[in-house]
Image (cartoon, coloured by chain):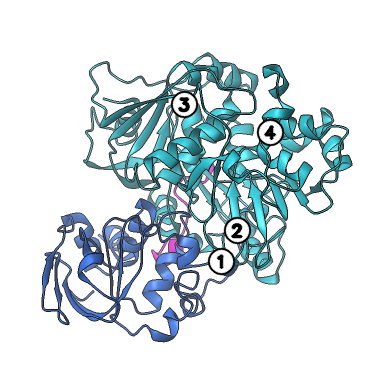
């Protein structure tokens, strides 16, 4: 994982649920590349054609609510999303993303300070966001040490493997 | 400590735990459903060879039951092979029903247990005094690999339910009303406990509907202190081996709320979020293309009973399709024995075999662009049951049946004037 993530912002609203992030009709797909093709399809069908590696999803409250489908985190990571910044996250999505090594930061009022298309630079460890387009700095909640440890190891699978190698 | 904390403390082999702490817990029952083939992949990606506790692992082929595409069939095939190779004998194949109902029917859900399933509605098991919580594929794979998983000990919100329900008003209306007032993210990361004089009167079926829906306010888990209703249910299922935990008198809830239902009328969650709740009468007369009765929220015997009561000797509107999906094989058998299935099919229902069916928009009753569906299930997100420009209304099983009868949204109270009619 890169400790500094830089990319273009895509801004979404409240309660973006996992059916919008990854519609149920594609759940039988399991290959990450195939899963990536439907990222955010229920919220913005053009997202997939526009997102570039490192780009950043910005959302209001309760991002990732609904189903526990890990596809929602897999599709965003595989589509190249570098980080997700939201005012709050639904808990299962939060766990799924951290487990996969996809950084998430809780940042109060982020949606008021970022517009779609703004260039952002995010320090995952400190929770500091710089909006390069507007020049303002936004400070978010610092991620817990344990979550950061999982991210640093590119996901929890590597940590579990290590545990058994010792 | 709260009873939920005591369950986690026992599972973590600790004297005590406190809210906010991260603890590693041994899981009593780990369930995987057929949407989560990634669980098996993650297990092998972590160099897993043998599942840590095959006897505490259960596989449900419910979301695609039975498979409606080659891809779904292949996913299920891989699960069956995994069960065979790993000596997992609790394979609940496509003839069994929805995971949460099977857990109840077969006595896998018991007080004091830590139950983790790859399904967000695992909060349902609070109805039995268990700590039930949903996770994704990789978290479940960690349990398969190690037998345990980390949890953040949640703060607990207490919701006290008081008053008497009017005819035509059910547990589903109560929880929709609460979610409408509190919002879809009110309980994120937290536990929700239900108490109160109304709660005491609720059956296991109604309690399961309440606990199930707390997921839609973001809850991590839900809890109802086991009482006579719980004990009678467990005894009826031959379940004797369980441990009851009780909340200490000095436990500090993070919030305590009371809802008096005396004046509550039937409720409806309008498109496209579960907290977009109104009195059902606000939408009375809105035409409905499909009425859907089923799922882990509203597909139990009591739900089919109230629908059969409303539709007995009547025919559904020719402008509406009425899908009936019993939550499990056991529910289907009991509903057949009691004549409910006969009544519903005679009224014009389309009977679907037990499973999740159209609830999550993969098969068996998906809805087209511009169509309106009223459903006894738990989510009305855009595209949830089919086309993203379809409209989904959430309501009680009685409200679903009344809408099927008339072809438009209808307050079911007029068909349920006498209180005992609801039973």
Q: Position of residue A78 (x, y in %)?
A: 40, 77
Indicate which disc, 3 or 4, sits on the residue closer to the N terminus: 3
The CA distance from mark 1 to mark 3 is 33 Å
Quarter of the figure with the N terminus of chain B: top left
Q: Pointer 1 indicates a residue of which chain? A: A
Which of discs 3 and 2 lies nearer the camera? The answer is 2
Indicate which disc, 3 or 2, sits on the residue closer to the N terminus: 3
Circle 4: element type: helix
Indicate which disc, 2 or 4, sits on the residue closer to the N terminus: 2
Where does label 3 land, which residue?
Answer: B111
Q: Which residues are magenta?
A: B42-55
Circle 1: element type: loop
The CA distance from mark 3 to mark 2 is 38 Å
| Disc 1 with disc 3 on a shared chain | no
Which of discs 2 and 1 lies nearer the camera? The answer is 2
Where does label 1 land, which residue?
Answer: A27
Q: Nearer the viewer, residue A132 or A160?
A: A132
Where does label 4 land, which residue?
Answer: B412
Give the drawing colour for chain A.
blue
The CA distance from mark 3 to mark 4 is 34 Å
Residue B22 to residue A121: above or below: above
The residue under the point 66% across, 53% down is: B373
Instruction: Spot the cyan chain and give its letter.
Output: B
Q: Pointer 3 indicates a residue of which chain? A: B
Where does label 2 land, which residue?
Answer: B391
């Amino acid at each position: 994982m890169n400790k500094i993530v830089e990319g273009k912002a895509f801004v979404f609203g409240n309660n973006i649920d996992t059916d919008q992030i990854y519609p149920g009709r594609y759940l039988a797909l399991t290959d990450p590349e195939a899963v990536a093709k439907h990222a955010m399809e229920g919220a913005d069908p053009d997202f997939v054609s526009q997102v570039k590696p490192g780009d950043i999803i910005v959302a209001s409250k309760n991002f990732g609510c609904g189903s526990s489908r890990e596809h929602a985190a897999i599709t965003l990571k595989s589509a190249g999303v570098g980080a997700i910044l939201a005012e709050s996250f639904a808990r299962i999505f939060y766990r799924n993303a951290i487990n996969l090594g996809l950084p998430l930061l809780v940042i109060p009022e982020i949606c008021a300070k970022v517009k779609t298309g703004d260039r952002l630079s995010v320090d995952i460890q400190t929770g500091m966001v710089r909006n390069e387009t507007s020049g303002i700095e936004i400070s978010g909640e610092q991620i817990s040490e344990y979550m950061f440890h999982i991210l640093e190891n590119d996901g929890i699978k590597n940590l579990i493997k290590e545990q058994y190698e010792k | 400590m709260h009873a939920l904390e005591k369950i986690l403390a026992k599972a973590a082999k600790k004297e005590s735990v406190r809210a906010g702490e991260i603890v590693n817990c041994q899981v009593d029952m780990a369930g995987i459903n057929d949407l989560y083939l990634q669980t098996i992949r993650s297990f092998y990606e972590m160099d897993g060879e043998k599942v840590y506790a095959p006897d505490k692992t259960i596989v449900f082929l419910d979301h695609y039951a039975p498979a409606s595409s080659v891809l779904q069939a292949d996913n299920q095939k891989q699960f069956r092979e995994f069960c065979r190779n790993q000596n997992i004998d609790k394979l609940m194949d496509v003839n069994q029903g929805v995971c949460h109902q099977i857990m109840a029917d077969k006595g896998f859900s018991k007080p004091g247990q830590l139950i983790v399933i790859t399904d967000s509605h695992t909060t349902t098991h609070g109805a039995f005094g268990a700590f039930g919580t949903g996770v994704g594929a990789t978290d479940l794979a960690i349990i398969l690999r190690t037998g345990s998983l980390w949890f953040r000990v949640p703060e607990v919100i207490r919701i006290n339910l008081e008053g008497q329900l009017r005819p035509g008003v059910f547990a589903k209306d109560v929880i929709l009303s609460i979610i409408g007032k509190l919002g879809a993210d009110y309980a994120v990361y937290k536990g929700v406990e239900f108490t109160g004089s109304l709660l005491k009167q609720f059956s296991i079926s109604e309690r399961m509907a309440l606990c199930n829906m707390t997921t839609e306010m973001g809850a991590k888990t839900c809890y109802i202190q086991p009482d006579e209703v719980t004990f009678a249910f467990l005894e009826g299922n031959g379940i004797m081996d369980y441990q009851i935990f009780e909340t200490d008198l000095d436990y500090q809830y993070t919030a305590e709320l009371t809802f008096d239902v005396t004046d509550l009328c039937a409720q409806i969650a309008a498109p496209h979020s579960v907290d977009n709740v109104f009195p059902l009468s606000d939408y009375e007369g809105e035409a409905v293309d499909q009425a859907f009765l089923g799922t882990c929220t509203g597909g139990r015997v009591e739900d089919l009973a109230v629908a059969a009561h409303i539709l007995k000797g009547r025919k559904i509107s020719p402008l509406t399709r009425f899908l009936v999906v019993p939550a499990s094989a056991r529910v289907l058998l009991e509903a057949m024995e009691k004549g409910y299935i006969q009544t519903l099919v005679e009224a014009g229902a389309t009977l679907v075999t037990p499973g999740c069916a159209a609830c999550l928009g993969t098969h068996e009753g998906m809805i087209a662009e511009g169509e309106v569906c009223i459903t006894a299930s738990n989510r009305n997100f855009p595209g949830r049951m089919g086309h993203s420009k379809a409209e989904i209304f959430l309501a009680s099983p009685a409200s679903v049946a009344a809408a099927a009868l008339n072809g438009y949204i209808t307050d079911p109270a007029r068909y349920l004037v006498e209180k005992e009619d609801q039973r």
